[in-house]
Image (tube, rainbow, N blue to C red):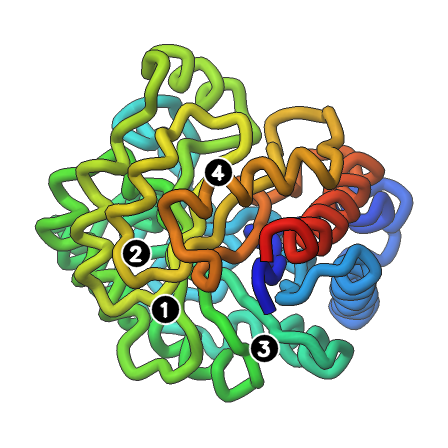
Amino acid sequence: MLFPTTIAGSLPKPEWLAEPNTLWAPWKSKGDELARAKRDATMLAVKLQEDAGVDIVTEGEQARQHFVHGFLEKVDGIDFAHKVEMGIRKDRYKAMVPQVVAPLTLKGRVHADEARVARAHTGRKLKFTLPGPMTIIDTVADGHYGDRVKMAFAFAELLNEEARALQADGVDIIQFDEPAFNVFMDEVSDWGIKALERAAQGLTCATAVHICYGYGIKANTDWKETLGSEWRQYEEIFPAIAKSSIQQVAIECRNSKVPLDLLALLTGKIVQAGVIDVASDTVETAEDVVKVIDAVSKFVPKSNIVATTNCGMAPMRRDIAEAKLAALGAGAKLARQQLG
């Protein structure tokens, strides 16, 4: 199938699961009820994607509050009780983050429940997202290792453990989210790719990396205003990614200032091209989606294009996110008719 569809990862949570949660507060401490709510939200996220015509579905990250901390919560050696302020993305913004205080080990499975629920309720290909090693160490304070690279590889080993288990759960594509790749460009080639490959080591399912300029918060929007009329940071890291064993790259293409000719540097990779703008409430038309796919096809073979969203949709209003999902499915269908 030309131009299959997927989403970057997250969807807005149903109102009854969103934080802060007042409607369901009386039973939030009861693990079985909360687990059931997360399961129901996961099934709903899968159903919404199927109804929209999405071919490669995700579980919508319904069981996580944050794309990084959702993983860290199941890791021993991390202190969430004594957070410290740290600069994120080369001090683009400050955040209170947990600390690594001891050797890192997994407490057990991280995402087994939601992966198995999603797998049991869809016959379509299933993609699952995990944070990448470089992005994790840029979102947690080091109070133990004393070495960024050493800590990144420690996290890579844990990610690999969970990724292998997700593959056994029936996941078809495992995607590592690495927005930090366009911040620490020198380190990407130096050790970032190697850490990413360590996280994916031994996987026989498809592997992907998602890179973006950041969405959902004002600090990212303000930073992008300083980047000029063309965002060419990817020019420094695409050649290294092209040489890697990672098979797919998810990248924003709709209403971004990334020159699409840079995609030609991803030789041999499947490109998950973002055709839906997650920074705007304007809902795309099917024709809008076709235009982006057509533009991408000038630099990427049509057989290597997967239509996706620019980034996760969690910060968006649910009705807008659902309308954008419908546009994604309809646009890919129209693209197959017009460009196939």
| Residue at screen point 42% across, 51% down | 210
Query: Which is nearer the N-term, disc 4 or disc 1?
Result: 1
Indicate the secondary structure of the residue bearing disc 2.
helix
Q: Residues within 10 Å of mark 3 (few under 14, many from 20)?
A: some
Residue 333 found in image quarter: bottom right
Give the residue type that dot 3 points to: Ala
Q: Nearer the viewer, mark 4 or mark 3?
A: 4
In 3D space, how far apart are the residues under numbered discs 3 and 2 (Cα atoms)?
20 Å
Q: Position of residue 299 (x, y in %)?
A: 36, 45
Residue at the extreme left of the image, as rendered? 190
Give the residue type that dot 4 points to: Ala
Residue carrying label 1: 159
Is residue 84 positioned above or below 203 on the image? above
Q: Residues within 10 Å of mark 4 (few under 14, many from 20)?
A: few
Give the residue type that dot 1 points to: Leu
Q: Residues within 10 Å of mark 2 (few under 14, many from 20)?
A: many
Query: Which is nearer the N-term, disc 1 or disc 3?
Result: 3
Residue carrying label 4: 295
| Residue at screen point 28% across, 52% down | 266
In 3D space, how far apart are the residues under numbered discs 4 and 3 (Cα atoms)?
38 Å
